[in-house]
Amino acid sequence: MRLALDEAGRAAAGGDVPVGAVVLSPDGRAVLATGHNEREATGDPTAHAEVVAIRRAAEELGEWRLTGCTLVVTLEPCTMCAGTITQSRVDRVVYGARDEKAGAVGSLWDVVRDRRLNHRPEVIEGVLADECARLLTDFFRLR
C-alpha cells in the first residue's frame, strides 16, 4: 500500500485525484505494474489508477488474464474499475479508503462479489485507510 500511496502522490502532482494502484505477481513478491490517475494528464476518462495498472500488468505478462495477481489501490474502486478487475481475473483486491459516493467493492455497490458474475476476487479493505483518506481529503480541501 505504501507504493500505491507513492503513486497517488504522483497523480496529485499532475493535478489528478490522488489515487494510486499496484499489481502484484501471483506469489506476491514482485510488482508487475504501478499506476495512478491520469485523467487530467491524458484527457482519457478511463485513465483511473486501477485501469492504468491493470493494462500495464497485462502488457508485462503478455496476456489479459491476471489470474493469481493482487491489485492494491488506495481508494475503493468504482464500477468501471470493478468491471475491469472482474474481466481481467484479478484474484485479490486490497484497498485503503472506502468510497461512499462511488465505491463498487462494498460501499455503494459490490460488483466484484456479485454471484451472477463468473469471477469474484477476494477483497481486503481498510489497509492504511486513514492515510489513504487523508491524502484525498487534503487534495480536495485545497481545491
Image (cartoon, helix red, strand yellow):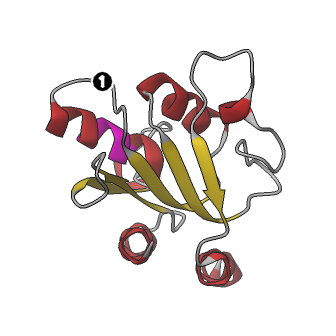
| Quadrant in which the N terminus is drawn | bottom left
| Image coords of residue 28 (percent x, y) | 31, 57
| Image coords of residue 35 (percent x, y) | 34, 55
For residue 3, what is the image quadrant?
bottom left
Residue projecting furthest to the front: 27
Q: How many marks?
A: 1
- Residue numbers of the magenta segment: 52-56
Residue found 24% across the figure and 61% down from its top? 29
| Image coords of residue 137 (percent x, y) | 69, 79
Residue 102 in the magenta stretch? The answer is: no
Residue found 57% across the figure and 23% down from its top? 119
Q: Dot 1 surroundings within 10 Å: few (below 14), some, or many (20 or more)?
A: some
Badge 1 is on which residue? 64
Q: Is residue 14 above or below residue 103?
A: below
| Residue closer to the observer: 92 or 60 | 92
| Image coords of residue 75 (percent x, y) | 61, 61
| Residue closer to the observer: 46 or 53 | 53
**Amino acid type at image mark 1:** Trp
- Horizontal side, residue 65 vs residue 47: left or right: left
Residue found 58% across the figure and 60% down from its top? 95
- Horizontal side, residue 129 vs residue 30: left or right: right
- Horizontal side, residue 130 vs residue 28: left or right: right
Q: Is residue 116 above or below residue 83?
A: above
Q: Is residue 20 above or below residue 128?
A: above
Q: Main secondary structure of the magenta part?
A: helix
For residue 130, what is the image quadrant?
bottom right
Residue found 25% across the figure and 33% down from its top? 58
For residue 80, what is the image quadrant?
top right
| Quadrant in which the C terminus is drawn | bottom right
- Find numbered disc 1 in the image and state the secondary structure of the residue it sits on: loop
